[in-house]
Image (tube, rainbow, N blue to C red):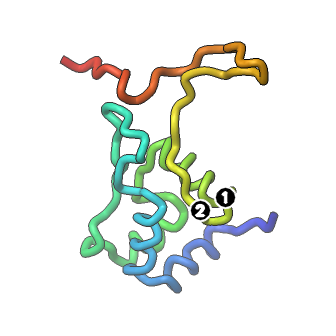
Amino acid sequence: MQVVDEQHQRLVGRELGKERFDHYLRAFGFGQTTALQFPGEAEGIMLALQDYNDTSMGSMPIGNGIAVTAMQMLDVYMTIANGGMTRPPRLLAATVDAEGVVLSMGVLPAEDWKDSNP
């Protein structure tokens, strides 16, 4: 794997331009909740396109000026690993072996999660 330094990342952002850069960030799911529908899931923080400027275009390609959740990053990594095909993330209810024996219980399905905030 080739190492890409910050200078090259900034160049990519500049070459894409504000509109295309924003399009790709949002196409990867940044700025919105995932298909997981996890209660209380954050959208992350993204600038509105009209608020992009030279400073943000120099900082966002290296990860400054935006905030994403761990699930959003996992979703991006899964998309890259799947050759650009997106699969919605999901939580596992259990791990089962080949004979159908439950080896471990995971987390509940999203619809069974309860909001702990009053």
At label 1, counting other C-alpha atoms closer than 10 Å, the crowd grade (few under 14, some 14-19, many 20 or more) is: few
Q: Nearer the viewer, residue 19 or 88?
A: 88
Viewed as shown, does residue 115 lie left or right of 61? left
**At 36% across and 39% down in the image, what residue appears?**
37
Establish if 42 lies above or below 51: above
Q: Is residue 104 above or below residue 47?
A: above
- Outermost residue toward the front? 99
Between 20 and 112, the one lying in front of the other is: 112
Q: Tell whether label 1 touches label 2 (CB within 8 Å).
A: yes
* Location of the N terminus (image quadrant): bottom right
In the image, 81 versus 88, the foreground residue is 88
How many residues crowd mark 2 within 10 Å: few (<14), some (14–19), many (20+)?
Answer: few
Q: Position of residue 39 (x, y in %)?
A: 32, 31
On screen, residue 96 versus residue 21, left or right, reads right
Which disc is residue 66 wearing?
none
| Amino acid on which the number 1 mark rests in the picture | Asn
User: Exactly how many numbered labels are in the figure?
Assistant: 2
| Amino acid type assigned to the residue bearing label 2 in the image | Met
Is 63 on the left or on the right of 42, as rendered?
right
Q: Residue at x 18, y 17 (%)?
A: 118
Question: Can you give x and y, in whole percent of width and height, for residue 59 in the image?
Answer: 47, 66
Give the image location of residue 21, x and y in percent.
Answer: 45, 75
- Return the residue at label 1: 82
Q: Secondary structure at mark 1?
A: loop
Residue carrying label 2:
85
